[in-house]
Amino acid sequence: MQHQATTKDDLAYVANVVRKANFDRGVPAIYVLWAVITLIGFSLPDIRPQVTGLFWGIAGPVGGLLSFALGHRASRREGATNQALAARYGWHWGLAAIAFFLAMLPAINGMPIAWLSSNFLLIAALVYGLAATHLDRMLVVPAAILAIGYVVLVLVAPPYTWTATGILMCVSLLIAAVRSRADA
């Protein structure tokens, strides 16, 4: 029995070494999940602003838990779990969730949520940009779209900026899903 455990550990080690040689490409199902969530959630400020906070209050945590489950399932399906990579993903997106929560604190003191909304776009651009740098290069295009959306929203504030950014995010995440599936 000890020999079987050692062989399994050895194979996991080799798989992790090979995996480190290539940059992680992410899980296509997670990209699709967040493409749908962002399309809906980014359109709400332009269409139904009164439900935007409720949507993100539910969709953010549920999407995070679903992402964890999908990532765990994909890792098990590959046959070798990379605990270090899983921990990096967990820390990254966990800290992102904390940043989004902290960005809401001024609303408790009465600051209008409309004044805070662009900060969420800025945080998302930074979070996706850092993820593209350290975790998954497929996220570089969504990060750039978020940054551009932030600049346009803050400097120009045209109508339907949130919806346009949501559509672009959705398309970029779907492209990332297709590309990551093709690389698998």
Image: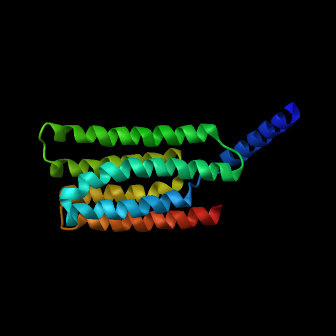
Quarter residue 172 falls in: bottom left
Name the residue rendered at 28%, 64% in the picture.
43
Question: Is 94 positioned to the left or the right of 21 in the image?
Answer: left
Quarter residue 87 falls in: top right
Question: Is 130 positioned to the left or the right of 83 in the image?
Answer: left
Colour logic: rainbow
- On the image, the x and y values in percent for residue 175 come to 50, 67
Name the residue rendered at 50%, 40% in the picture.
90
- On the image, the x and y values in percent for residue 158 come to 18, 66
Name the residue rendered at 37%, 67% in the picture.
168
Name the residue rendered at 50%, 57% in the picture.
30
Q: What quarter of the picture does the N terminus occupy? A: top right
Q: Is residue 84 above or below residue 50?
A: above
Which of the two residues, 139 or 106, is positioned nearer the viewer here?
Answer: 106
Question: Is 144 positioned to the left or the right of 136 in the image?
Answer: left
Give the tally of numbered discs.
Answer: 0
- On the image, the x and y values in percent for residue 74 come to 62, 53
**From this viewpoint, is residue 164 visible?**
yes
Q: Is residue 121 above or below residue 94?
A: below
Q: What quarter of the picture does the C terminus occupy? A: bottom right
- On the image, the x and y values in percent for residue 76 come to 66, 49
**From this viewpoint, is residue 23 visible?**
no
Which of the two residues, 178 or 156, is positioned nearer the viewer here?
Answer: 178
